[in-house]
Amino acid sequence: MKKLYLLLTIMLCGVMPIMAQNTDDNHNKAVFLSSDGNSEVNTDDIQLIRFDGGKVTVVQPWGETVFDHTLQNLTFFRSQSGTLRLTVDANIDTSDDTNRAFSIDGNGNLVSTWQSGDVVYVYSNKESTTEIGTLTPATTGSSSARLVGDVSGLFDNQTLYLETQPRTYSFASQTGSLSNMFYAKATATVSINGGNATISNATFTRPMAVVKFTLKDKATTYAIKASPLIIKIGETTYTVTPTSAASEIYFAIPEFSDKDITLTATVGTDTYTYNKTGVTFENGKYYSIGVKMTRQANTGDIGKIIATNGCIYDHGATLPTGVSEAGMIAYVGNESDCAHGLAIALADETGDKTFGTAGTTASQKNSDMPVVGGTWRIPSKTDWENMFLACRKDGDASSAASDMTNAGFRDKLTACSANVTTSEKYWTSTTSSGDNGYCIYVGSDTSASIQSTPKINTLKARAVLAF
């Protein structure tokens, strides 16, 4: 005879214990529930329970566990031994046409349906990662299905948590396809009659938003195929890696509000980026978003134009309405505090400047920034050297030195109608001593030299965009 002895003494003042003891196996258990439903304790592993106002202390064989929850009730159930066959009539919430996100019907609409191979994992509480059974659909092809499977440790009137992905599921890595994205959750109360366990109805809702990104090149408007697509939301980064490069990529994410989002796509050997601020996605909603991505410059773009929309074009190309040429790409790399490269402005700053005034004037161009995260500035000594070397042609100097040839650099600027003035000095942002700064002297031939001059002198200034 299985017995469970319980001594419960509640006094208006003080702390008194509740003693719980099993005389054999685990088929009798006391279930202790907190008011918020987050904590459930079985007497299988309990040696002592005691109450102190709203604080509950459970003493277990290996130590003491404290539950700081207000007591809702204390109930005792006799659980069924072994496993029971559980039947659930399940529906997916499709009340809102935008709230559908797991397959595409013949009309191009996104719909939610139970499919062959779907698995529902059954949990006995909100937090455990160990399921007590699994269910599979007996019918498929619609948003309603009967789910059937074996579940262990059930008792009458128990709340079950049903989820279509295991709780170890992570949103961090996805394939960009709808086929492996079916994630929905439901709670329901079980009813036991003899050896049968049933749930009359369970409505599944989705604890995430589903987004379809359609990727295009911002400059050409052509579709681009990415693999992978890196998605950064706030400070959290997710990686979507399609089995083959794709221009339409699906992504599931728990809801968030008013956060910055950055997309980085690898398209062959090119990298594309996209940024948007103040983005909000709601659980259960489906979003279809066309994303115009900007290609980052590579060495093949040196001598091309970066426009005010951040895109790269050939000089003289027809630009979109309201877009103009901002600078010529003169260096690609990560030297001298630039993440990707340098573009030199297509004209000198107006009037000759002192060392300090030159820097201030260049920074004012940041109010019309063509590249997210970019900075307009006077080029440093190293910036000038890097631009000369990156634009070099046969016969130019192959390394930085006090005296350099810059024919390739000047040829590229001339092709963009933006050459520097010869026999003139241009400021760098580099200090040579307390009162002196470095400048670049552009010779009347193809020479250039680095010189030191007093900061109070007025010289020409040409800004660069570090991007």
Image: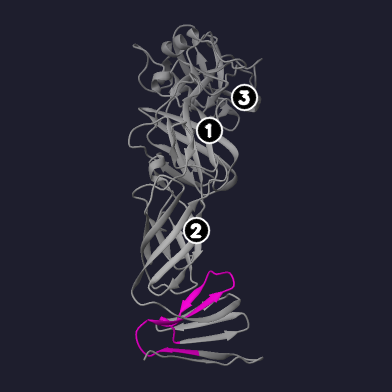
Task: Specify how the rendered protein is coloured.
Answer: one colour
Give the Cα distance between marks 3 and 2. Answer: 64 Å
**Quick one: quadrant of the N terminus?**
bottom left
Is 23 part of what is drawn in magenta? yes
Give the Cα distance between marks 3 and 1. Answer: 36 Å
Q: Where is residue 418 in the image (x, y as percent from the top left)?
A: 54, 11
Closer to us: 260 or 423: 260
Looking at the rendered structure, the kind of residue marked 2 is: Ala
Residue 363 drawn above or below residue 48 = above
Closer to us: 122 or 326: 122
Q: Can residue 130 be seen in this view?
A: no
Between discs 3 and 1, the one toward the N terminus: 1
Q: Residue shown at 45%/68% (left/top)?
A: 124
Q: Which of marks 3 and 1 is in front?
A: 1
Tell me the crowding category of disc 2: few under 14, some 14 to 19, or many 20 or more residues within 10 angstroms, Cα based. Answer: many
Q: Where is residue 114 in the image (x, y as percent from the top left)?
A: 41, 48
Secondary structure beneath dot 1 equals strand
Tell me the crowding category of disc 1: few under 14, some 14 to 19, or many 20 or more residues within 10 angstroms, Cα based. Answer: few
Q: Mark 2 points at which residue?
A: 202
Closer to us: 70 or 294: 70
Left or right, 158 with reference to 150: right
Which segment is the magenta one? 19-47
Q: Mark 1 points at which residue?
A: 289
Looking at the rendered structure, the kind of residue marked 1 is: Ile
Is 309 part of what is drawn in magenta? no
Q: Which mark is residue 362?
A: 3
Between discs 3 and 2, the one toward the N terminus: 2
Secondary structure beneath dot 2 equals strand
Between discs 1 and 2, the one toward the N terminus: 2
Q: Position of residue 279 (x, y in %)?
A: 59, 40
Q: Residue shown at 42%/29% (left/top)?
A: 247
Q: Can residue 152 be seen in this view?
A: yes
